[in-house]
Image (spheres, rainbow, N blue to C red):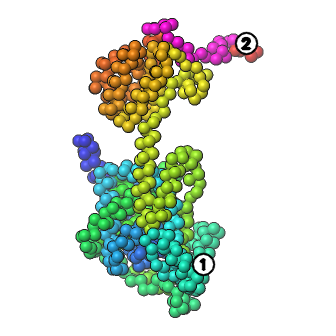
Amino acid sequence: MKDYLNETLNEAKLRFTPFRAWIGDLTDPAILKADIIAGVTVALVLIPQAMAYAQLAGLPPHYGLYASFMVPIVAAIFGSSKQLQNGPVAVISLMTAAALAPLSLTVEQTVMYAALLAILAGGIQLILGFLRLGILVDFLSHSVVLGFANAAALVIASLQLGKIFGIDVETGHYLHDTLWNLAVAIPVETHPLTLLMGILALVLLILFKRFAPKLPGILLTVVITTVVAWLTGYQDKGGAVVGVVPAGLPAFAWPEYDSTHIKDLMLPAGMIAFLSFVEAFSVAKAVASKTRQRLSADQEMVGKGLANLVAGVMQGYPVSGSFSRTAIAFDAGAKTGFAAVVSGIIVGITLLFLTPWMYHLPVATLAAVIIVAVASLIQIAPLIHSWKVNRHDCFVAFVVFNTTIYFAPHLEKGVYIGIAISLAFYIYRTMRPHFAEVSRYADGTYRDALLFGMHTSDTLALFRYDGDLYFVNAGYLEKRLVNAVANKPELKVAILDIEAVDQIDTTGEEMLTHISEWFREAGIDFYITRPKFKVAQVLKRTGFYDKIGEDHIFSRRRDALATIIHKYGDLVDIEHLTYHLPLENTLPETGNKQENS
């Protein structure tokens, strides 16, 4: 514990200076130019996306720009990834809306509490990062994230359909209630001009993405539909537009809130903190696999924490790393975190000088941007792959997918259920590790005799146990050993290979002591082979070595077998554990040459 605290304090000094790893590279004009170009390219996508995602979070669109100004800059400076682009993302935006919905807030209060949620999530991430507890996110297994991402994409897209049809949908307690209300309203309340604008935006986004992926398709779609809305008098004919966007940079301000609501936000803030980091770090790892850069989960957690804190005090809302914008930055040639700094600066320039141009931007266009953006989150191939690897994982993904959709927009409930099922399956698998009596195969390896239909001996048995040995499975191993021996009434020697045991607890050690005594009383000589160093150290400290005898524990199976042969000779049948080299491998080299000639 003392060493952990010392290392934590020493590393804490370095958490605020990770940018030193890349800032020196900016002296190279080529790298500086590449980062500027990449930063501008990302900003052209970030600006319309941020406004759309703010709308998804239940906030006025310009608050998405507030969450995109200083956030990318801070995250780049204090994170470990050089290409990761941070800011508003779809899933975290929807979770923000779901967290605030039960509080029945006004628009002004929603803005304040969204900022408070960012501060709470950032504080959690910052604490975890400094305490080097980024490893906790591993409890979110790949199958949980996979099922959640697919479900969240469908939920997010379906919640935007009302804006495409121009219908103000009555929100139900669950997603299916909301969709039913939408289905009932479509024949009666659809606004034809809004529907046409939404379809135009969707078509443009899809065409740009498919036939001109290098162009800023989202920005061009926003510009085209905004111009069309202005020229056709779209607003005057009932079409919803963004309207007035306040000019100027967001001010530093601590959100005002009712302290009684803190307890209502802590659990959602914790889930947002975990999921935003998982999403961001997954993206960072995908890029790092191509750039071969070093990543630190704890440093990235600190970067996310500071970014969320900044978002909160600058009237933003919770943020994360964006897969689409990071891919754009990477494809555009981003080399360092300076690309994200450039993106943040351009958002600031937009807030200062370009907000009047956004007045006629159709709300349906922002809905179309969200729908197309989250479509890439739907992935079927990984589900099929998980079925091939482990059906438990596929089952977890299936359950998370369905429960997330059922409880939507409260997406976190599906994640909770997924984590619980994943842990249950883990415990179930470790309760019944693989146990087998082994024999020598034709190639000289030891294999499961039952599985491969190989001969065994009635007088000597070599057992292999493939798992850790702790309170959950110690009884299982004891039962398997007793039953295996009961099937061999003439057994004289039993060997247990525990090479796979990496962890052993008190229950496991006591079981080994008990089984060794049971074997002794039954007149069976009991040996243990290949314990790992740390397991052997535990067994020595507890006195197990003295109880069983050091001459009954071997680091190699061959040494154990040699001792047994020397001790028992023909009294035990060891033929099934003997390896005979094939004839062609035993011939002298000269003999082979003569035969070949």
Q: Is residue 36 left or right of residue 15?
A: right
In which quarter of the view is residue 16 placed? bottom left
How far apart in space, not on screen, are marks 2 and 1 (Cα)?
A: 81 Å
Q: Which residue is drawn at 44% across and 54% down?
A: 418
- The secondary structure making up most of the magenta span is helix
- Residue range in magenta is 567-591
- Residue 582 locus on image (x, y percent): 64, 17
Closest to the observer, 343 or 420: 420
- Residue 264 locus on image (x, y percent): 31, 66
| Residue 384 can be seen in this image | yes
Q: In which quarter of the image is the C terminus?
A: top right
Q: Residue at x 44, y 18 (%)?
A: 494
Closest to the observer, 481 or 385: 481
Give the answer, above or below, for where 431 lies relative to 401: above
Image disc number at residue 594:
2
Closest to the observer, 547 or 278: 547
Give the answer, above or below, for where 128 lies relative to 205: above
The mark closer to the camera, 2 or 1, is 1
Decide: few, some or many residues near mark 1? Use Cα within 10 Å; few <14, some 14-19, many ≥20: some
Q: Are marks 2 and 1 in contact (CB under 8 Å)?
A: no
In which quarter of the view is residue 381 placed? bottom right
- Residue 459 locus on image (x, y percent): 49, 14
Q: Which residue is drawn at 36% across and 56% down?
A: 301
Q: Which of marks 2 and 1 is nearer the N terminus?
A: 1
Residue that label 1 marks: 199
Q: Answer whether residue 571 is magenta in the image.
A: yes
In the image, what residue type sits under mark 2?
Gln
Image disc number at residue 476:
none
Q: For numbered disc 2, what is the local secondary structure?
A: helix
